[in-house]
Amino acid sequence: MKYPLSISRLIEELIKLPGIGPRSAERIVFHLLKTPLQECTRLSEAIAEVKKKIHHCSVCYSVAEADPCPVCSDPGRDPRTLCVVERPADMMAVEKSGGYRGLYHVLMGKIAPLDGVGPDSLRIEELVRRVRKGGVDEVIIATGSDVEGEATALYLARVLKPLPAKVTRIAHGIPMGSSLDFSDGVTITRALDGRAPM
Amino acid sequence: MKYPLSISRLIEELIKLPGIGPRSAERIVFHLLKTPLQECTRLSEAIAEVKKKIHHCSVCYSVAEADPCPVCSDPGRDPRTLCVVERPADMMAVEKSGGYRGLYHVLMGKIAPLDGVGPDSLRIEELVRRVRKGGVDEVIIATGSDVEGEATALYLARVLKPLPAKVTRIAHGIPMGSSLDFSDGVTITRALDGRAPM
């Protein structure tokens, strides 16, 4: 005996989501079975609403309900600085830090040839066009510090080089509040290389 | 700047699901944003279908589209043996093993006073009534081997004692294919206590 058809079908749909395997899908199904119908409907409606309302900002390619997004259309932000991030979630992380007042450019991924993601699949051409248009003094590359993020940063530095804007990379080093003996060797090496006068 | 309202709302709904925290909810949202609308609709429809079609079997309390469920209505199964499990997923696990031809009784949980689950919240009264009606020779208690599962087993053994059916507990010991030095002390003690002549 197997699960009833409708349960198998829901499990099948759930395991397509990232981070959800067959066991967690099962748990979610039994949770939904216990949940009042109204709550389940709220979940479905929330999915539908996100699909209907959320679009990519035509300036920075982040996700937003408005176009341009609230950051791009905020007159209080400094348009001469662009921070290049991989995904909207990274942009949200920088925003939460509260330490940045410039604008963003969201690549929507990182160069990962093994996953079939080349520069053409990302919003790199749009970034180059945006910088070439002028008015940008500095492009801060804030892609991840993993292999693909670093490769993407190097690629961006190369394509942006002919343009008049200064290209910088966010600093890598010991995280705040952490101590040296909790840091791995690569991080310590980067922290030493990136040392600054004080 | 925070996420657009519709994204925050979907994240809020997703973190209500078991095993999904704020970070995995974010990942799921961005996955859904990339997914074609049709696929997202399929997920919502699958949820709605499960809520509409799945009911508890009025005999064993497992989940099924039909009532009684396919196991309870199978004339080839032995109605004199009942296997008592905590959840429908446990019943599926026993079914997958292929080693059991009797019927089931699904408690829909285990006694867990700290979570507010007492015997009355489970299908224990229904089990007693089912056994009292007669025709059951043996009740195999197959609740989990954690503290709550064991407590539930002891409670069941006590309430079933006055009835004419034999009450047994599934064996606990070294899992097949495993060796002693991978087993914890409690399991080895149970395996020694449960030793059988050969």
Image (cartoon, coloured by chain):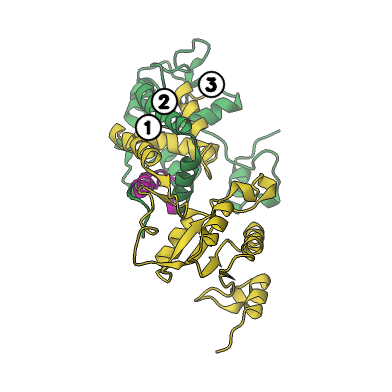
Chain colours: A yellow, B green
Q: Residue at x 34, y 67 (%)?
A: A76
For label 1, the SS is helix
Disc 1, disc 2: CB below 8 Å? yes
Residue on which disc 3 sits: A1
User: Which secondary structure lies at badge 3?
Assistant: loop
In this orientation, which residue lies closer to the viewer: B56 or A130?
Answer: A130
User: In this image, B60 relative to A160: left or right?
Assistant: left
Tell me which chain the residue with mark 3 is part of: A
Residue B133 badge: none
The stretch in magenta equals: B6-22
Q: Amino acid at mark 1?
A: Leu
Q: Is residue A172 above or below residue A158?
A: below
Q: Is residue B177 left or right of residue A196?
A: right
Residue B33 forms part of the magenta stretch: no
Q: Residue A71 location in percent, x, y?
A: 38, 59
Q: Amino acid at mark 2?
A: Val
Name the front one of labels 3 and 1.
1
Amino acid type at mark 3: Met
Gap in Å between the C-alphas at discs 3 and 1? 20 Å
Gap between marks 3 and 2, in whole Å? 12 Å
Regarding residue B187, the answer to whether it shows in the image is yes
Asked whether the residues under marks 3 and 1 belong to the same chain, the reply is yes
The residue beneath circle 1 is: A33
Quarter of the figure with the C terminus of chain A? bottom right
Numbered mark located on residue B63 in the image? 2
Name the spot of residue A31 as percent of width and height, x first. Answer: 39, 37
